[in-house]
Image (cartoon, grey):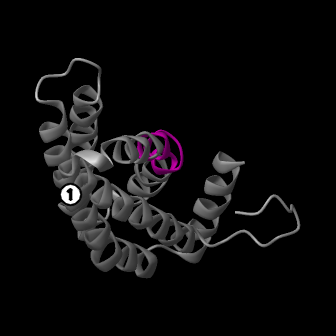
Amino acid sequence: MTNDPSAPVPDFFAQLLRDHHDLEACVVELGRAADQLDAVPGEAAALATLATALAYFDGPAARHQADEEQLLFPQLRSLPAFTQMIPAFECQHQLNDGTLAELRAALQPGAPARIGTVADLVRRFVEMQRAHILAEERALFPLAARTLAPAIVENLTRAQAARRG
C-alpha cells in the first residue's frame, strides 16, 4: 500500500489477494532455498534467503493472518456456510505456525541434522502454504465476498487499512 493519504484504499479482499501474491513469491524463494540447501555451495545463500523469509513471516505475513483471524473470521463464524470452513482455516493457520516454529528451531545453532532437517521442513512449509493459499482463494474469499454485505466489507477495508497504517 502506498503512503499517499489521498490514494484509494484497496478493497479488503483485493488486499488479501495482493498479500497472497507476495506470500507466493516468498514461498517460491523458500522452495529455491530448500534446493540450494541440498547443494553445499548454495548453503550460505539459502540460509540468507531463509532469514529474509522468516522476517517476512514475522511482518507482512503475520499481519495478513491477523486480518483473517481478527477481522474476517469473526464476521463469518456465525454464518451457516462457514461453520465448518472457519475452524478448518484456523487449523491450517495453527499447523502452518507450528511448522514455522519447527523451522525456526532447526535453524538455531547446534540443531541436530540441521541442513537436512531444514530442507525437509522448508519443503513441507512451502507445500502447506501453497495449499492454504489455494483454498482461501478458491473457496473462502469468493464465498465471503459474495456473502458479506457491502457495508461490512467497507468496515473490514477500513479496519484493515487502520491496522496496517
Helix or strand or loop: what does disc 1 sit on?
helix
- The residue sitting at 68% across, 56% down in the picture is 161
In the rendered image, residue 62 lying in the magenta stretch gets the answer yes
Quarter holding residue 4 = bottom right
- The residue sitting at 55% across, 74% down in the picture is 14
Q: Mainly helix, strand or loop, the magenta region?
A: helix
Does residue 137 appear to the left or right of 86 in the view shown? Answer: right
The x, y position of residue 106, in whole percent, is 22, 29
Residue 128 in the image: above or below residue 40: below
Magenta stretch? 53-63
The x, y position of residue 51, in whole percent, is 43, 39
Does residue 34 appear to the left or right of 71 in the view shown? Answer: left
Query: Within 10 Å of the Cα at label 1, are there few (<14), some (14-19), or many (20+) other Cα atoms?
Result: some
Q: Residue furthest front?
A: 41
**Amino acid on which disc 1 is placed:** Met
Quadrant that contains the N terminus: bottom right
- The residue sitting at 52% across, 75% down in the picture is 149
Quarter holding residue 44 = top left
Does residue 138 appear to the left or right of 19 in the view shown? Answer: left
Does residue 11 appear to the left or right of 125 in the view shown? Answer: right
Q: Is residue 89 visible?
A: no
For label 1, the residue is: 128
Q: Nearer the viewer, residue 79 or 120?
A: 120
Q: Nearer the viewer, residue 50 or 15?
A: 50
Q: Is residue 26 visible?
A: yes
In the rendered image, residue 1 lying in the magenta stretch gets the answer no
The x, y position of residue 89, in whole percent, is 25, 56
